[in-house]
């Protein structure tokens, strides 16, 4: 069984949040997202993040399924509008 990318260097999926809007922070996000794109469980990962975060206020952490917290919040808003 293949090791999931985020299990090799888990900090990469979270530590950019402490780096603010810096070049280094954006580079870490891009690197994590690139690895998520190749992940065999990406769709399931995103679905699990959405299940966990559904009903939770507006703060979530880390990159899941290739999306940052802000991107997941935006996606959640679009999904809610679509069903309304
Ligand atoms: S899609 Fe999910 S499980 Fe896969 S590398 Fe990204 S965060 Fe990890």
Image (cartoon, helix red, strand yellow):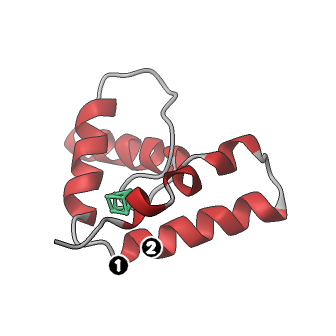
Residue 33, given in percent of the width and then of the height, sits at: 50, 68
- Neighbours of disc 1 within 10 Å: few (<14), some (14-19), many (20+): few
Of the numbered discs in the image, which one, if any, rests on residue 38? 1
Residue 64, given in percent of the width and then of the height, sits at: 39, 52
Residue at the spot 52% in from the left edge and 65% down from the top edge? 32
Q: Judge whether 35 appears above or below 50 on screen.
A: below
Residues at marks 1 and 2 touching, judged by CB atoms closer than 8 Å: yes
Of the numbered discs in the image, which one, if any, rests on residue 35? 2
Q: Quadrant of the C terminus?
A: top left
Q: Judge whether 59 appears above or below 2 on screen.
A: above
Q: Is mark 1 within 8 Å of ligand 1?
A: no
Q: Judge whether 62 appears above or below 45 on screen.
A: above
Q: Secondary structure at mark 1?
A: loop
| Of 5 and 38, the residue lying toward us | 5
Horizontal side, residue 14 vs residue 63: left or right: right
| Quarter, ligand 1 | bottom left
Q: Is mark 2 within 8 Å of ligand 1?
A: yes
Horizontal side, residue 6 vs residue 24: left or right: left
Q: Secondary structure at mark 2?
A: helix
Residue 9, given in percent of the width and then of the height, sits at: 51, 59
Q: Quadrant of the N terminus?
A: bottom left
| Of 49 and 80, the residue lying toward us | 49
For the residues marked 1 and 2, what is the alpha-carbon distance in whole angstroms?
A: 5 Å
Residue at the spot 28% in from the left edge and 64% down from the top edge? 42
| Of 48 and 56, the residue lying toward us | 48
């Amino acid at each position: 069984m293949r090791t999931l990318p985020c299990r090799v260097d888990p900090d990469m999926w979270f530590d950019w949040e402490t780096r603010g809007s810096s070049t280094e922070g954006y580079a870490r996000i891009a690197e994590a997202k690139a690895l998520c794109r190749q992940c065999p469980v990406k769709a399931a990962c995103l679905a699990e993040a959405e299940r966990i975060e559904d009903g939770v206020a507006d703060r979530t952490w880390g990159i899941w399924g290739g999306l940052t917290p802000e991107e997941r919040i935006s996606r959640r808003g679009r999904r809610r509008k679509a069903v309304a």
